[in-house]
Amino acid sequence: MTSYIIYFGFTTARTVLNDDQWNRVKDILPGIASDSGTTAANNRLFVEAVLWIARTGAPWRDLPEQFGSWHNVYNRYSRWCSKGIWEKAFKALSSDSDMEYLMVDGSIVRVHQHGAPEKGALSI
């Protein structure tokens, strides 16, 4: 189930993972019909919820209702962390990285002390 939003009459999917990326990780994730136990209702919606949290930096309680209960999403996220599911998914996705979301922030990246000009040097 993909959520949609309408911009000026055009309907677009609000997802982070495109279909190719999803197809690479969907069989790695637990909860598919071939697994023992409960089958997940919608792994893609859950992954999109976690990516929404990662992208926005919002607290779990601010997760939009379209993704379900924030507490259930958090509990499932925590279980997947302890089982190493996320690491497997990230390895599958990083094998073909497109650098679409690569960012360098000047407040984090600094010039090494030897790369900075000397004090009192002429400036342009």
Image (cartoon, grey):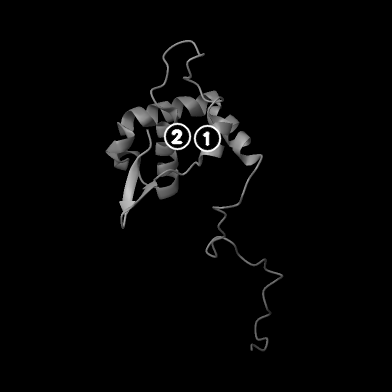
Q: Which mark is residue 47?
A: 2
Residue contact at pointers 1 and 2, CB within 8 angstroms: yes
Judged by depth in the image, the label closer to the viewer, 1 or 2, is 1
Q: Is residue 121 left or right of residue 106?
A: right
Using the image as rendered, state which of residue 59 and residue 44 is in the foreground.
Answer: 44
Q: Residues within 10 Å of mark 1 (few under 14, many from 20)?
A: some
Q: Position of residue 47 (x, y in %)?
A: 45, 34
Secondary element type, mark 2: helix
Quadrant (top left/top right/bottom left/bottom right) for the N terminus: top left
Q: Which mark is residue 22?
A: 1
Secondary element type, mark 1: helix
- Considering every residue shown, the one lying at the far right of the view is 114
Q: Is residue 37 above or below residue 41?
A: above
Q: Is residue 56 left or right of residue 17?
A: left
Using the image as rendered, state which of residue 121 and residue 71 is in the foreground.
Answer: 71
Q: Position of residue 83 (x, y in %)?
A: 53, 23
Q: Position of residue 57 (x, y in %)?
A: 40, 48
Residue at 55 percent across and 57 percent down: it is: 103
Using the image as rendered, state which of residue 74 and residue 49 is in the foreground.
Answer: 49
Q: Which mark is residue 10?
A: none
Residue at 44 percent across and 48 percent down: it is: 55
Given the image, on which type of amino acid does mark 1 rest? Trp
- Considering every residue shown, the one lying at the far front of the view is 9
Residue at 55 percent across and 65 percent down: it is: 106
Using the image as rendered, state which of residue 110 and residue 17 is in the foreground.
Answer: 17
Q: Residues within 10 Å of mark 2 (few under 14, many from 20)?
A: many
Q: Position of residue 9 (x, y in %)?
A: 31, 54
**Looking at the image, is mark 1 or mark 2 earlier in the sequence?**
1
